[in-house]
């Protein structure tokens, strides 16, 4: 928020207008500030006092201080950023990150505390949590207090600093803030209603909703209810640990840090740092092993000075001596793959080098054999075409819809994809259609509704494989791209394929009485069908470019997999090279 300029020499009417504009902007900006620990109550109160007292100079300096700390991240590592003292010189941002300038900092996160206590006690509670933190703790955190289910859900949605949630039994449902528009926004993402929820059930209900939206968060429950009544219940499944109200606060503090430590571990990188310190010779890359040819040279020592010693000591082309093997991982690489899969809601995960171009080719060659038909967007990346050639698969191209007024293309309409499936069924080649390969998002920024696409396509052919190329989208969990994935996937899978375990009567009845698919009937194209719960197989592959949305060397990519028949193709992911394809059959 940048306040309008206020000059002491300006007419009073201009100053009043600028003050009113600042007040309006300030009120708008602070509506959701309770969802973050910074700037916090003290700084916000100082800003409000300066604004109400018409102290334009102080107000402007405090705004610059807060905005500068938010942009630079100083609030994560410097206590002075939280101070209400006027410090205009702190508006200057560091040119280099803290670990480069020689002032390393601890990772910072925030803890959401959902409590029934009076808001007047929250400042004291935050200070108590701050005092429990010790100098030898590996992490540091600040607390965010809210008093209702609605406020907690809003904080979880907007505050990316949150990494843990402490639920204290007894809080209410409705927000104490008058935010009708934000409640409407909340209702679009959560079916949060007080009907049928007793105060004692709010904590476990909130835990389930938080886990659905942000599965990575650690959840802790403080309650005076008997723990044995909660521990075995399905409602308490998302909770990492439960405490009795009389537990020492230090136990909660240590549990929070322990949960963050579990997720902070990086099996491969941690092992690589140990490997770099081992006094052993490396024969896989002799010229640069331990940097001998560089640091001992009269001419290229500047290369060693530029890159430093670690990049040479950690030369990782060897697949023995403790580094594990990408071809058959059993140690730290396997643990890393399991952590990736857990983080993104997949059953399996494979990191790859050389970008998503190679990941696409790996997946296509894994799931396709010569003669298979793949329905694919004609505007897809060329790596998909290369994959089809290598696998001997036959592409069935479908067209994206043109947006001529914007000189771009959209996605492939669902109707067009269904038409391709029905055309193959009419031609007698539906049994050869192996996969649907779509780019999500497209090169022009358009995204599909993957769940809707897959459900309607599986209703036509229940064993389709789906490949979603998400190289150009911000990294997302696999959950939105699969009818069966992560926690929600277990419920949806039960709805689709396990009639003996409580399949809803509606779907059971529909599947029993559904009319036979007539590919020549025009009405089949627009009719919404449900997948046959006795035949459907969930087989979803997502490729994404880690190097475009996170941090990775060598154009890092990931293949996220939710495939109930993965055992049929698993061997392909551990081969050194791809098999030579047989001649491709003539297109039908």
Image: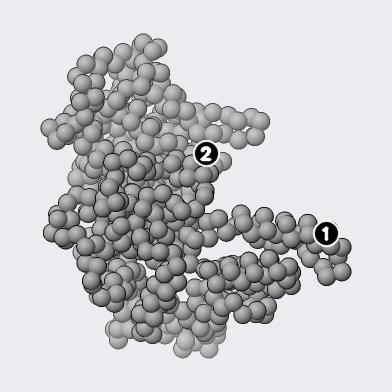
Instruction: Determine whether 49 is above or below 495 in the image.
Output: below
Mark closest to the chain's N terminus, 1 or 2: 1
Which residue is labeled 1 in the image? 14
Instruction: Look at 36% across and 36% down and name the residue there.
Output: 451
Q: Determine the secondary structure under disc 2.
A: loop
Instruction: Look at 66% across and 30% down and name the residue there.
Output: 405
The image quadrant that residue 373 belongs to is: top left
Nearer to me, 334 or 223: 223
Instruction: Look at 38% across and 77% down and name the residue there.
Output: 128
Horizontal and vertical percent for residue 409?
Answer: 57, 34
| Discs 1, 2 touching: Cβ within 8 Å | no
Instruction: Determine whether 392 is above or below 39 in the image.
Output: above
Q: Estimate how packed mark 2 is, as few (under 14), some (14 to 19) or many (20 or more) residues with alpha carbons within 10 Å.
A: some
Nearer to me, 343 or 395: 343
Tell me the CA gap for discs 1 and 2.
45 Å
Determine if residue 130 is in view: yes
Please count the marks in the image: 2
Q: Estimate how packed mark 1 is, as few (under 14), some (14 to 19) or many (20 or more) residues with alpha carbons within 10 Å.
A: few
Instruction: Determine whether 494 is above or below 294 in the image.
Output: above
Determine if residue 313 is in view: no
Horizontal and vertical percent for residue 544?
Answer: 42, 50
Instruction: Look at 29% across and 25% down and name the residue there.
Output: 530
Say left or right for 238 vs 468. left
Nearer to me, 40 or 571: 40
Q: Determine the secondary structure under disc 1.
A: helix
Horizontal and vertical percent for residue 353?
Answer: 40, 58
Horizontal and vertical percent for residue 487?
Answer: 27, 47
Which residue is labeled 2 in the image? 446
| Nearer to us: label 1 or label 2 | 1
> Could you tell me which quadrant the C terminus lies in?
top left
Residue 74 — which label? none
């Amino acid at each position: 928020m940048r306040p309008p300029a206020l000059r002491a020499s300006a007419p009073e009417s201009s100053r009043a207008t600028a003050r009113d504009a600042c007040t309006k902007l300030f009120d708008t900006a602070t509506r959701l500030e309770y969802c973050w620990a910074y700037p916090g109550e003290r700084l916000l109160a100082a800003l409000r006092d300066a604004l109400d007292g018409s102290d334009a100079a102080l107000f402007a300096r405090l705004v610059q201080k807060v905005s500068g700390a938010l942009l630079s991240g100083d609030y994560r590592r410097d206590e002075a950023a939280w101070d209400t003292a006027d410090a205009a010189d702190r508006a200057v941002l560091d040119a280099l990150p803290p670990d480069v300038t020689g002032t390393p900092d601890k990772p910072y996160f925030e803890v959401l505390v959902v409590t029934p206590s009076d808001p007047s006690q929250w400042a004291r509670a935050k200070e108590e949590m701050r005092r429990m933190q010790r100098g030898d703790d590996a992490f540091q955190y600040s607390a965010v207090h809210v008093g209702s289910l609605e406020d907690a859900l809003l904080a979880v949605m907007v505050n990316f600093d949150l990494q843990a949630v402490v639920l204290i039994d007894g809080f209410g449902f409705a927000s104490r803030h008058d935010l009708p528009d934000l409640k409407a926004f909340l209702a679009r993402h959560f079916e949060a209603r007080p009907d049928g929820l007793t105060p004692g059930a709010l904590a476990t209900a909130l835990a389930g909703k938080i886990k659905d939206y942000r599965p990575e968060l650690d959840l802790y429950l403080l309650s005076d209810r008997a723990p044995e009544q909660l521990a075995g219940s399905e409602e308490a499944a998302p909770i990492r640990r439960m405490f009795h109200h009389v537990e020492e606060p230090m136990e909660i503090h240590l549990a929070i840090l322990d949960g963050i430590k579990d997720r902070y571990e990086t099996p491969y990188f941690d092992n690589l740092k140990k490997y770099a310190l081992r006094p052993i010779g490396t024969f896989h890359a002799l010229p640069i092993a331990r940097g001998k040819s560089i640091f001992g040279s009269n001419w290229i020592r500047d290369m060693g000075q530029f890159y430093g010693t670690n990049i040479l000591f950690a030369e990782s082309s060897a697949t023995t001596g403790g580094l594990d093997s990408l071809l058959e991982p059993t140690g730290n690489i396997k643990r890393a793959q399991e952590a990736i899969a857990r983080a993104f809601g997949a059953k399996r995960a494979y990191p790859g080098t050389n970008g998503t171009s190679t990941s696409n080719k790996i997946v296509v060659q894994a799931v396709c054999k010569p003669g298979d038909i793949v329905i694919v967007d004609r505007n897809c990346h060329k790596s998909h075409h290369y994959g089809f050639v290598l696998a001997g698969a036959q592409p069935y191209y479908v067209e994206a819809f043109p947006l001529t007024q914007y000189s771009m293309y959209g996605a492939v309409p669902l109707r067009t994809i269904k038409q391709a499936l029905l055309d193959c069924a009419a031609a007698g080649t539906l049994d050869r259609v192996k996969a649907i390969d779509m780019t999500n998002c497209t090169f022009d920024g358009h995204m599909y509704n993957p769940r809707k696409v897959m459900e309607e396509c599986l209703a036509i052919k229940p064993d389709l494989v789906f490949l979603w190329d998400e190289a150009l989208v911000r990294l997302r969990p696999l959950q939105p791209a699969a009818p069966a994935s992560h926690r929600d996937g277990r419920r949806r899978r039960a709805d689709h394929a396990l009639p003996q375990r409580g399949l809803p009567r509606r779907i059971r009845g529909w599947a029993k009485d559904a009319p036979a698919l007539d590919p020549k009937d025009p009405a089949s194209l627009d009719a919404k069908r449900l997948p046959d719960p006795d035949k459907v197989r969930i087989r979803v592959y997502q490729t994404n470019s880690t190097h475009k949305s996170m941090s990775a060397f060598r154009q890092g990519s990931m293949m996220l997999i939710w495939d109930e028949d993965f055992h049929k193709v698993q061997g392909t992911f551990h081969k050194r090279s791809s098999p030579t394809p047989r001649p491709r059959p003539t297109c039908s």
